[in-house]
Amino acid sequence: MKDNSMSSRIFDAFNCAFLAFLALLCFMPMVHVMALSLSDSVSANTNAVLFLPKGANFEAYKMVFGNPKFLRAFGVSVFRTAVGTGANLLLTILAAYPLSKEANQLRGRTLIVGYFIIPMMISGGLIPMFILISKIGLMDSIWALILPGACNVGYVIMMMNFFRGINKSLLESAVIDGANEFVILFRIVLPMSMASVATIALFCVVAHWNEWFGGTIYLNARDLWPLQTLLKTMMVQLDLTGMRPDEIARIKLLSDRSFRAAQVMFATVPILFVYPFAQKYFIKGVTLGSVKE
């Protein structure tokens, strides 16, 4: 029963106001970057822009969307994020499901779990990883950004613990009805685990989209760089190589800060649209997982 007392209403009002204030604090930097990207060079260079653009100027976005390097890097990032997230989820689910069984159902389960946990505690480091990528022929390949991290042990453990929390009577009933392990996994376990799957998928999407370091050490060809690697390089030093004379002339009329703010918005906005689509799976997973005894 809902508490309608005065103290409860005061607490709810304070709680809503506090959360709204925190949300505003998180939103304000993005508003500032957006305003900066739409402002003229004089206002941007003199730090006169706060939350509203001054001297509306869309040249920065024309430069971004008209630059083939940005569009190509954007396509690489989309491919990497889509394929990488799919590989992460597939390997995580296939590894976590058998490990969620009891020791009497999976022989050597304890040893296998220990085998998974050891890499979390002991890492070879950057140089051995670079040598490995080089020896197996993944240098200058987009797969060098996808395959090495395709199976994240932390996600496997998270998914394994979620699978272990599913009501065992449902699985036993499916076995009695003649269902094999693949039917149980894809028809019963996964639909009830959509909250966990959506959470891990969101983690993977953000990780793949924001990762930039791998491109700098594994990819020598700039045509294969993902968007974040290209942006990192251009944030350090504006690269004018490959630009047409008219683009260079337009750059000179723009503020360097406005152009970089437009680049940041170009890279940030797509990932912001992922969470609203994932939200419904959070809710669906919670409702499907509520088993009544």
Image (spheres, helix red, strand yellow):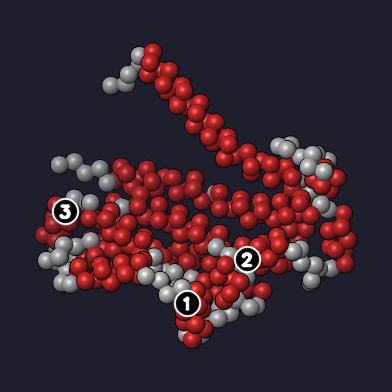
Task: Assess disc 1: are there few (<14), some (14-19) or many (≥20) residues with their C-alpha within 10 Å of its C-alpha.
Answer: few
For residue 179, side relative to residue 92 (left or right): left
User: In the rendered structure, which disc, 1 or 2, sits on the residue that comes first in sequence?
Assistant: 1
228 above or below 7? below
Amino acid type shown at disc 2: Thr
Would you name the residue on which mark 3 appears?
Answer: 168
Going by the numbered disc 3, the residue's amino acid type is: Lys
Image quarter hosting the C terminus: top left
Residue 147, image quadrant: bottom left
Q: Residue 205 vs residue 269: left or right? A: left
Q: Is residue 47 left or right of residue 139?
A: right
Q: CA distance from mark 3 to mark 2?
A: 46 Å
Per the image, the residue denoted by label 1 is 129
Give whichever of 192, 130 is nearer the camera. 130
Residue named by callout 2 = 229
Image: 88 above or below 57? below
Percent position of residue 254, x then y: 83, 53
Query: Regarding mark 1 in the picture, which secondary structure is present there?
Result: helix
For label 2, the SS is helix
Q: Which mark is residue 171?
A: none
Instruction: Look at label 1 and name its amino acid.
Output: Met
